[in-house]
Amino acid sequence: MLHDDPLPSRLSSDVYNVLRRQIVTGELRPNQPLIELDLAERLQVSRTPVRESLQRLAHAGLVVPRKRGWAVREFTPDEIRQNAELRMALEGYAASLAATRGSPSDIAAIVAIHERRLKLRRSDEEMRVKTNRDFHDAIMRASGNGRLTDAIYHSGQFYFNTPIARATTGEELALGNADHALIVAAILKRDGAAAERAMRAHIQRTFAVFWRVTGLAEPLQVQPR
């Protein structure tokens, strides 16, 4: 829940970050209407920070104008492919930085989230999505590069959300956890190159699951590095 802040710009940034996260994680779905008044009531803020946030989200390419307000942008198959390729590059580099410059507490947080995910069942869909996002966010924080994190969030929607989690097979869940284990192992070894390779492969696999479930785009083809 958001609370009033004496600095409107900070409140606007809080609202923007909440809405951006809900869009990129799939909580707000493509073409879902975004009405200022409804959002203001749900977030318990005035309409001004909501209006400012929607304008920023439009500039970031995440929402589009409609006759009555705004709507979450629906990406084309080619845009989805390009977004996924961009995320592979950006998050791969974030993992490399996390391995080489992450503090012991940063890395401990990554390990703890990974271990928590391993205890989840396939039916724990919402927690699987939340801990997955927590895992990636923890790696971004460990990278120590806020601009890189912003660029990742501006690269479009993430492709592991609740509908995708619901449709994944047990084998795909196990493979995803194995991907995370490789990333964690590389970070613990302070091996930036291995962490980057593991993250890129993980995002490729996640996108392949998204493609299988939705049929929207061809799987990514990644050249070994």
Image (spheres, rainbow, N blue to C red):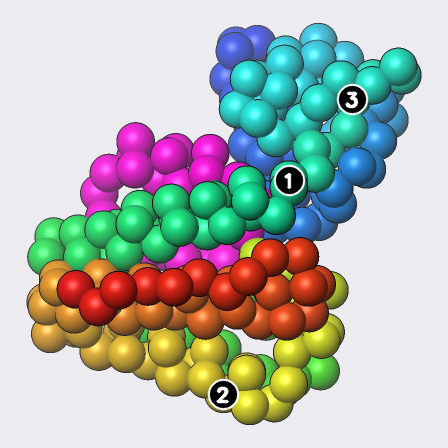
Which mark is on residue 49? Answer: none
Secondary structure, magenta segment, majority class = helix
Residue 224 figure quarter: bottom left
Image vertical order of residue 34 relative to residue 184, above or below: above
* Number of other residues with Cα within 10 Å of mark 1, as a class: few under 14, some 14 to 19, many 20 or more: some
Q: Position of residue 159 (x, y in %)?
A: 57, 57
Find out whether the residues at labels 2 and 3 contact each other: C-beta distance under 8 Å: no
What label does residue 75 carry, if any? Answer: 1
Q: Can you say which quadrant of the picture contains the C terminus?
A: bottom left
Depicted 155 relative to depicted 107: above or below: above
Q: Which residue is mark 2?
A: 174
Crowd band around label 3 with a 10 angstrom C-alpha radius: few (<14), some (14–19), many (20+) = many
**Viewer-proximal residue among 26 and 210:** 210
- Range covered by the magenta-colored residues: 133-158
Give the mark nearer the N terminus: 2 vs 1: 1
Given residues 37 and 153, the one toward you in this image is 153
Q: Quadrant of the N terminus?
A: top right
Q: Residue furthest right?
A: 68
* Total residue callouts: 3
Asked if labels 1 and 2 touch by Cβ distance under 8 angstroms, the answer is no
SS class, disc 2: helix
Residue at the image point whose x is 44% and y is 61% from the top:
220
Q: Residue at x 65, y 78 (%)?
A: 168
User: Residue 141 magenta-drawn?
Assistant: yes
Residue at image point 66% right, 19% down: 54
Image side of residue 21 versus residue 193, left or right:
right
Which residue does the numbered mark 3 point to in the structure image? 70
Residue 35 position in % (x across, y down): 84, 23
Which secondary structure, mark 3? strand
Q: Is residue 39 visible?
A: no
- Alpha-carbon span between mark 1 and mark 3: 15 Å
CA gap between label 2 and label 1 equals 29 Å
